[in-house]
Amino acid sequence: MRLAVFTKNLTNPAYGAARLGAERAAAVFGAEVLHFVPQKGDDPEEQSALVERALALSPRPDAFVFSPVHASKVDPAVRKIAAAGIPMVGFVNPIDAAPMAGYVSSDDHQLALAIARYLFRHLRGRGRVLVVTGPEESYTSLERLRGFRDAAREVPDIVLAGQVAGDYVREVARERSRQWLQANAAPDAVLVANDIMAIGVLDALDAAGQAAAVVGVNAIPQAIDAIAQGRMLATADFNAMQMAYLATECAARHLLGEGIPERIELPVRIVDAGNCAQWDRPYAERPVITLEEFRRQT
């Protein structure tokens, strides 16, 4: 059994965890994992070319476990997979260009809404907040930005004082946050669309000699460390390793002729100083739940 696993980039630790999750699930079934990752992160042309490369293999992969880098720009490549008669299980971002055997994700809007509400409660309903987004056309970033804005509309004295795009890259978030901090009054807090950017924001705040309540999304080890040290307030657990584990398990079970869910949505979990010890371990040591366990919990 050969499984082609497509993740978005090499820069976001969450996708390194996703690749590990796929390997952990594949090992249960004795399946071979072939990883396909754009060297230029989140690049639709490169991901499409990687699909062509996977389809040209002999033998071809038996199934694709696929996280598209863009909501529509890889659709032609997705349709080629379907035309080849190879089943697909999507994860992280929805895929509409062709039928999926299954799909695994979290609700990005609900994650963002939850972490923003947590932050606004911490601020006691008043404060100036900088928002740091991912790439402008990223599905996850757009949904998280929508959640941030919806939460802010619930609290009249919360002011979204600015917005910068950190592109889901620590260095980009650090530099653009640095520029914003130089040009504007210090914010009370920063809402960040993912954790690796949140670490970049902390870098920028430290360099500016400023402090603010920073929250993110992902629960990557660097963020857990920052929460434990009191440098970062909280994060929402967007568990890409668990998503990829379940997506890979679903792909394997589908190939074995077993029924799998059309859609799996992981619950929203907020990680802060009170519970971060549960996440304070390397990805390889973090627990995952199997499809059977997920079914028992829901």
Image (tube, rainbow, N blue to C red):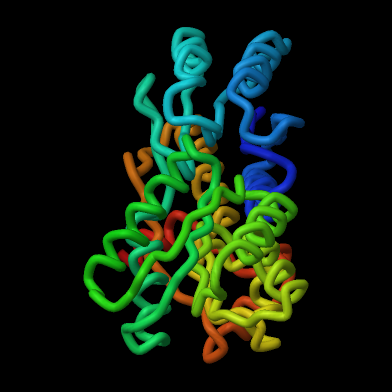
Identify the residue shown where x is 65% and y is 71%.
223
Identify the residue shown where x is 61% and y is 50%.
166
Q: Which part of the image, by quadrant, shows the N terminus?
A: top right
Q: In x, y percent, where is residue 149? A: 32, 59
Q: In x, y percent, where is residue 217? A: 52, 63
Identify the residue shown where x is 40% and y is 40%.
103
Is 12 situated above or below 252?
below
Q: In x, y percent, where is residue 98? A: 38, 20
* 92 horizontally vs 1: left or right: left
Would residue 285 be seen by someone viewing this image from the given angle? no
As rendered, which of 237 and 65 lies closer to the eye? 237
* 2 horizontally vs 105: left or right: right
As rendered, which of 261 and 168 lies closer to the eye? 168
Identify the residue shown where x is 47% and y is 23%.
87
Q: Which part of the image, by quadrant, shows the C terminus?
A: bottom left
- The total of numbered circles placed on residues is 0
Would residue 207 be seen by someone viewing this image from the given angle? yes
* 240 horizontally vs 223: left or right: left
Q: In x, y percent, where is residue 266? A: 40, 59
